[in-house]
Image: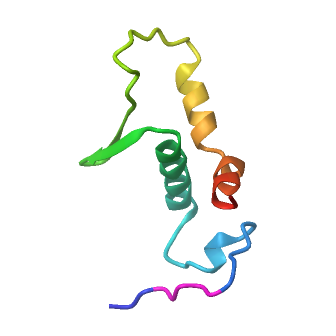
Amino acid sequence: MSSSPIPTKEIPIEDPFAYYENINRKQFQKLLFISNALDNGWTVKKQEHQYIFTKKHENKKEVFQENYLEQFILENNNLDTFLKKTNK
């Protein structure tokens, strides 16, 4: 069983795929999205081939705006957000 070596230096974000030949752009986007969602307080579960995102709203009734899903995707699919959290 071969595994990719753990890099001993910082990975230049311009080309993270050069260091990990086994990860493709789609996998990286999933990793980024799920990591940001977890950091934003969401719970993520995988059932078969679907990811389920849930977040407690303190038992309050919530009415979501029409653009809620779009905002959710934009907030969690943001590399800058991820980098700011990891650089703290």
Give the residue displayed 58% in from the left and 26% down from the top: 70
**In the image, residue 13 above or below residue 83:** below
Residue 18 in the figure: left or right of residue 32: right
As for residue 6 lying within the magenta part, the answer is yes
Along the line of sight, which residue is nearer the eye, 62 or 67? 62
- Horizontal side of residue 46 vs 75, given as left or right: left
What is the tally of numbered marks visible in this picture? 0
> What is the quadrant of residue 83 in the picture?
bottom right
What's drawn in magenta, residue-wise?
A: 4-8
Q: Residue at left 49%, top 53%?
A: 30
Give the image quarter of residue 65. Answer: top right
Q: Is residue 76 magenta?
A: no
Task: Tell which of 43 and 4 is nearer to you.
Answer: 43
Q: Which residue is found at the position 52% from the left and 46% from the top?
A: 39
What secondary structure prevails in the magenta region? loop
Q: Quadrant of the C terminus?
A: bottom right
Given residues 19 and 42, the one toward you in this image is 42
